[in-house]
Image (spheres, coloured by chain):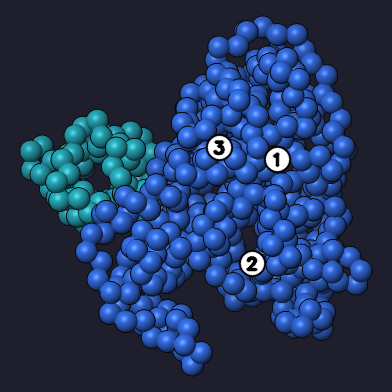
């Protein structure tokens, strides 16, 4: 899980253009300034590419925060 | 025929609202409506502007109906708006009473009365709806204004009644069993029809929470609750495009696309996800009350021009004409500006005679509104939208004057020269690029300053710099060349 968190943190910093961003399990789109529909799409694409996985729309809908996404990534690896 | 204003149903069994997966019956909505209407009546308000902080809460919806049923003017105020903008709306609209539920706003000058809706009585006697005259104002929405001040669009009770007289002709087979999506920000007039339609048909309205990523939540609601009627902006559909293969919405019966040009390719693909739905394109500026040209698309061979789906024909009480630069009607098939006349068209902007002069014209002895949209009409009488005449763009359906964006950036940067361009992002949705002459030392400080003046959707997605702007032969900033240089160099 540590590696997943570190890699995801890197993705978030790049996509949301904030080098000091630290992800937390409870974090949602409302906590990050540039996290909107378009950057969300980019973040998902980068995550899929980095981990070599693919999310289904139904899975994306169920993810309520960063923690849910980290768990889903782990499940798919 | 539908009355306006009206009292919501008091059915104890039927669902009226679903907010964050919680259902509220019509008798609950009706009681909240009565309590709010009583509070308004207690203050002897009639024909007055009432500000309502737009929250994703049942009292917001009950209050809108109560403001109308007491014959007042509904003015939505978004809590996320910068305080300068809220101040401007409150002062321009002359708001007498400000109501709120869960989100508060802190304008620099508070209206004389403020009412927290949750502190009201919980059981109230029913009220009768008054019948405002056609020229009284039902709501005022504020859109981007080119000088940096939001522009008020007052829509009268008569305008809304004229709009509603079209509903029977839309041939909607809808009833209390149907489920309706309301995805719009309340400052956007498609929210008005997304609220009126479910309550008039006594169906259930599903709200979309005000969070940053709406499209996944919209999909969840459509799928999980088997929504039958939805008005969507095409940009939301575009975000869902990578997942079209996974999407199957057989319960969707009316899929209305509106608020932006409707892309043909996207529509054809989206239709496969909603195999049983009637698809409609609803066109119209806020100044002509929600929509005034409509098109029910055929199952196949949808007519389009330049990749944009046909907008169809004028509604019953609207007269459309296409004119050239000399204000003369063009021949059928020729392009020009679409102008609109009829009972859906507003009388004029809020205290803005200068803007009225620009936006309205006398034509054949009647008053027409200039849509600013370039259109043509084909041999079958169908209208097609081709693009904008001016520097107005739509971002997620919000109408934005690029000159207002330029004005605010320039002011923040000590009157530097700025050009705002509209471009498409990788999903095909519109975005704004701010081009600044000279260096931009502190982008984050600029963005922070802009956030105090403009809503989030007006802030450019990207900033670029040019050492010097090219000028055209008249010595003006050559926007065409800047557009070419900047957009051809895009990623």
Position of the C terminus of chain A, as image quadrant, is: top left
Marks 3 and 1, Cα distance to the nearest angstrom? 12 Å
Q: Splitting the image into 4 quarters, where does residue B252 fall?
A: top right
Chain ID at mark 1: B
**Image point (22%, 64%), residue name:** B441
Residue B149 locus on image (x, y percent)? 55, 53
Q: Is residue B411 above or below residue B62?
A: below
Q: Nearer the viewer, residue B347 or B253?
A: B347
Q: Which mark, by number, is residue B309?
A: 2
Q: Residues within 10 Å of mark 3 (few under 14, many from 20)?
A: many
Q: Which residue is more in the foreground, A72 or B373?
A: B373
Numbered circle sitting on residue B139: 1
Image quadrant where residue B206 sits: top right
Q: Earlier in the sequence, mark 2 or mark 1?
A: 1
Q: Colour of chain A?
A: cyan
Chain B drawn colour: blue
Q: Quadrant of the N terminus of chain A?
A: top left
Disc 2 on helix, strand or loop? strand
Q: Is residue B54 above or below residue B353?
A: above
Q: Which badge, 3 or 1, comes first in the chain's sequence?
A: 3
Picture disc at residue B77: 3
Report, in whole angstroms, how far the alpha carbon at label 2 lies from the one at label 1. Answer: 30 Å
Badge 2: residue crowd in 10 Å (few <14, some 14–19, many ≥20):
many
Residue B8 in percent (x, y) is at: 74, 24
């Amino acid at each position: 899980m540590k590696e997943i968190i570190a890699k995801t943190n890197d993705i978030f910093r790049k996509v949301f253009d904030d080098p000091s961003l630290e992800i937390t399990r409870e974090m949602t789109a409302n906590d990050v300034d540039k996290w909107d529909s378009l950057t969300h799409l980019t973040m998902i694409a980068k995550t899929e590419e980095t981990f070599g996985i693919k999310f289904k729309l139904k899975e994306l809908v169920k993810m309520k925060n960063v923690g849910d996404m980290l768990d889903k990534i782990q499940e798919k690896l | 025929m539908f009355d306006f204003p009206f009292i919501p149903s008091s059915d104890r069994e039927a669902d009226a609202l679903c907010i964050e997966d919680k259902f509220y019956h019509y008798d609950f909505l009706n009681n909240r409506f009565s309590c709010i209407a009583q509070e308004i009546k207690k203050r002897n308000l009639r024909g007055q502007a009432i500000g309502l902080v737009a929250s994703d809460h049942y009292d917001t919806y009950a209050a809108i109906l109560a403001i109308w049923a007491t014959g007042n003017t509904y003015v939505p105020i978004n809590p996320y708006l910068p305080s300068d903008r809220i101040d401007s709306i409150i002062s321009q609209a002359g708001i007498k009473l400000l109501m709120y539920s869960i989100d508060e706003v802190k304008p620099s000058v508070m209206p004389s009365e403020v009412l927290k809706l949750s502190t009201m009585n919980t059981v109230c006697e029913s009220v009768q709806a008054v019948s405002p005259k056609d020229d009284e104002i039902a709501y005022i929405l504020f859109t981007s204004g080119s000088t940096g001040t939001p522009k008020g669009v007052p829509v009268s009770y008569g305008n809304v009644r004229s709009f509603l007289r079209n509903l029977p002709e839309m041939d909607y087979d809808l009833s209390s069993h149907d489920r309706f999506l309301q995805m719009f920000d309340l400052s956007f007039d498609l929210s008005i029809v997304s609220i009126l339609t479910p309550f008039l048909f006594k169906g259930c309205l599903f709200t979309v929470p005000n969070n940053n990523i709406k499209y996944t939540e919209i999909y969840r609601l459509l799928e999980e609750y088997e929504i039958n009627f939805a008005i969507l902006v095409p940009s939301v559909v575009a975000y869902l495009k990578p997942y079209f293969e996974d999407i199957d919405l057989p319960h969707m019966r009316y899929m209305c696309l509106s608020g932006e040009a409707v892309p043909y390719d996207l529509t054809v693909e989206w239709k496969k996800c909603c195999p049983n739905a009637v698809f409609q394109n609803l066109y119209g500026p806020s100044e002509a009350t929600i929509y005034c040209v409509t098109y029910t698309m055929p199952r196949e061979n949808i007519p389009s021009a330049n990749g944009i789906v046909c907008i169809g024909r004028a509604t019953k009480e609207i007269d459309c004409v296409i004119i050239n630069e000399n204000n003369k009607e063009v021949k059928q098939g020729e392009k020009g500006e679409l102008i609109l006349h009829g009972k859906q068209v507003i009388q004029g902007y809020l205290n803005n005679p200068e803007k009225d002069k620009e936006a309205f014209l006398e034509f054949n002895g009647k008053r027409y509104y200039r849509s600013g949209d370039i259109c043509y009409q084909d041999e079958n009488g169908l209208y097609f939208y081709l693009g904008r005449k001016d520097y107005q763009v739509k971002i997620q359906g919000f109408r934005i004057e690029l000159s207002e964006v330029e004005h605010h950036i320039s002011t923040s940067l000590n009157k530097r020269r700025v050009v705002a361009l509209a471009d498409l992002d990788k999903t095909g949705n519109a975005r704004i690029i701010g081009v600044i002459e000279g260096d931009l030392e502190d982008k984050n400080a600029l963005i922070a300053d802009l956030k105090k003046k403009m809503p989030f959707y007006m802030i450019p997605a990207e900033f670029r710099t040019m050492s010097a702007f090219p000028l055209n032969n008249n010595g003006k900033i050559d926007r065409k060349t800047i557009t070419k240089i900047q957009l051809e160099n895009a990623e």
